Amino acid sequence: MKNSIRLAFAYLKYYKKQTLALFLGIVLSASLLTGIGSLLDSGRTASQENAREKYGDWHYSLRCDYPWYSDFQEHTKGKGYEVEKAGVLTVRKIIEEPFEIKLCYADAGYMTLMGRRLEAGHYPRENNEAAADTYTLKNLQIEAELGARFELDGEEFILSGIISDMPESEGMQVFVNEGLDYGTNGKFLYLKFDESRRVYRQMVNFANTFQTDKTSIYMNDKVARYAGGEAKAALWETVKSGISMEGTGFPYIWAVLNMYWNLTEKAVLAALGLFGIFIIYSLFQVSVIKRMSQYSIMQVTGLGEGATFGILAAELGMIFLAGYPAGCLLGNGVAALLYQKAGKIFVQPEDFIVHSGAAKEQAAQMMNMPDPGAFHFSRSVAAGGAAFLFLVLLFLAWILVRKMRKMTARELLAKDSGKKKNRKIYSTKTQSLTGVLTRKFMFARKGAFAGVLISLSAGSLIFLGTAYVTENTRINNELKFKADDGLGSDMQVLEDSDVLSDVMPEDTAARLRDIKGIKSAYAVRYMPGEISLPDGMLKWTSYYPEIAGEEGFDPDPVLMEKYNGIAIQTGEDDYKLKVNIYGYDDGMLEEMNEYLLEGSIDPEKMRKENTVILKTLMGGQGTYEGISLSSGDSIQLKTPVNTEVSQEVLKFLAEENQYREKNFKISALASRPLAKVDTYIGDDGTNRVDIIMTNEQMKENFGVEGYQTMSIRLEEGADAEHVSAKIQKVTSGIRKCIVKDYTQQIETQNLFLARKMLFFYGVALILLVISLLHIMNSMQYLVTARKHEFGIMRAMGITDAGFRKMLVKEGLRYGIYSSLVMAAAYLVLQKFLYYFIIHVYLYLHPKASLPAFPILLMAAVNIGICIAAVLISGQAVLKEQIIEEIRE
């Protein structure tokens, strides 16, 4: 073994260029793998901490005004569970006007879990005192000054304290004194379990211990998912369901397993590891091929395969022991610097928390640009990567030994395959033999030639694939940015009401448009409706719990009570769906073209022909086949007779004289709405069917005159805080009208997307640089391996210029052939990526292919690098003595 190590060390010292190339290959591969692994790990940790900050540091909540609660207070740690923190919120009363507001008392544990801090004043001590956050105070139009008096539900309160902003989804809260009691209390317990174990199992053990109903326990999924808050899906059951269930398949399997095993990150790291292995193998193979004759001599003198394997493994091991730690240091050093400067791009962004009327400084603090926190070195990735690479390097050494086994000693000495030589004479028919020699050199070993082409095209292929995904990620982010996040406008004025008569009058909209600093204000009219889908037109019946018939998939009780659910079955294959009907201004309709699935959107034509846009359902695989309706088809739309009807009419079960029915032709299908109203049947952009038309059609067809929401865009350089105050003044007398300011969030999100795209292209560039190192090494070997032949040619009289010309031809041909291989492989890769980003990651309207320019650019880079590499290597050949080259 010692002799193998000594011989391996001698080889490393003698072949310095190959050793250096292999060392750099390992360093760069390790740095990329461990650096990106640490960045992803740091981002995941930061995402968890940001989720705590935004949604509260708790996992589950449940009603606790039951006898078991006193027992729990004495047993916060039990068999199979440990509660780290607990808090209780007592809801004293819920008032409906002017908004839905909870009057609450909260203990210190709840305030800690929710991150609610007292920013000014004191917590209520008397029954007529109250505390609230600035968001609630602004919407109630109460001055945020201690001692301010205000009235809620006919009762006067004094503002005793100002609380920090609430977590997402907690609604408006006003905190009152513990002694204030209206006799309608509801007590809720919030729990945070020990995160060193799966919290789902702890919750089950907790429920069993205190005999509570598990179905009544609410999970804070945004936080609990990082600590194993859900029941883990069984691998085999998931695969079996994906194979057997219609319409599921691979996207379903990947989506479910990705939720629990984080497959996306693992796939990225695996791809980087495999790319590194490919580069290392190619570099080391070149080094070994150069020494084939030496290994043959050692085999003739009695060196066995085991000893040969030991030498190769020792070479790789020594370089690995030096290169991998250096790569870890380099990769994590660069990653730490990058994370410090732009760590926010690695943190999963959540939906935005938007507060109305807040000052600019406060808004900047409330922005949802995620806090990256501290950089974390991922020990698991570093250790796992080291073990993986080391084992694979041993496997590579074994592969090379097997290759040698298939060659005889004579073949090893001659470094040829022993194939029959072609003795054809070309000089009698060809004046210049450089082209012939180039072809003969290239195609002498077709297997090696094919391997070189694949090696040369690999880096460019990865770069193009990364560029394709990056470009479609940018498009998807921008589309979802406007439609799903609601950030298509700088500000939004909306009715926070589920009463149809609560609208903004037309004259208010006109006054808003006249405010200085507003560039455009798109108004939206609204009406709930119902469409008939007979004869099996609704394909995805399992989409709606009301008609799915699946145990455990229960309808929303609030939707059932207020609207009789979303879907009802009227016959064997006949259904009716509740829909949102929107009226848009022309400018917003023009922007809907970005979300067009089929048909055309022309506001003037829509008014003239009274046609509508159908926003259809989006499935879990990014498809839109849930309803058998296309552009050109007609739908029957049922709506309340006017906006003054009672709430009961919105169930669509009242007398027929309370409704009107009308047929409309569909002019286009769309994937998303731009402006949404979610205070009625809800609308997250994917789970509801929407009917969209012009505002004029809404007025003519349904008599809707007022507006439910207005999307406002500001002029460049406008003072958002000043404009927001003006808007608040204009809308102050309108019932349940609130203003949301998105300006800071939009600016932040744009910066976030720009940095993320820059990072993606940076990774692609690093991969390209690594592949260029490999190309240079491969082309250099192709030249230096033929020194003997080149020496003979020089002795026969080929000039230096002729020699260089021959090398240029060879480099050009390798560049062209490798570019053709790259283009062909990219077509296959592109189809795979296109399927993945649509059906697995649910991208909106991705491009089917990249423009021709990036492909041509990479082909030009390939050709240029190949020519440069052979010329550089050829220059080294020209510097040597002819007699020395012939002796090679």
Image: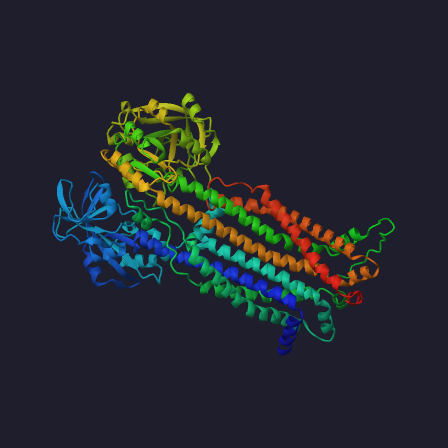
User: Percent from the top left, x then y, of residue 17?
Assistant: 65, 66
Answer whether residue 241 is visible to the viewer in this image.
no
Residue 223's x, y, as percent? 34, 54
| Residue visible at 30% across and 40% down in the picture | 722
With 796 as the anchor, is 313 left or right in this view?
A: left
Is 227 situated left or right of 424 in this image? left
Q: Which of the image's four quarters has the C terminus?
A: bottom right
Q: Quadrant of residue 686?
A: top left
- Return the residue nearer the eye: 780 or 103: 780
Nearest the viewer among 803 and 838 is: 803
Residue occupying image coordinates x 69% and y 64%: 289
* Percent coordinates x, y for residue 46 in the rendering: 38, 57
* Vertical arrangement, residue 604 with respect to residue 875, above or below: above
Give whichever of 691, 785 is nearer the camera: 785
Q: Quadrant of the N terminus?
A: bottom right
Say left or right for 785 vs 705: right
The structure's colour scheme is rainbow
> In the figure, residue 139 lies in which quadrant?
top left
In the picture, measured across the screen, residue 345 lies left or right of residue 805, that is left
**Residue drawn at x 44%, y 52% as measured from the top left:** 258
Please name whichever residue, 540 or 865, is drawn nearer the observer in this view of the structure: 865
Q: Is residue 294 above or below residue 99?
A: below
Residue 231 position within the rendered picture, expressed as x and y whole percent measured from the top left: 37, 54
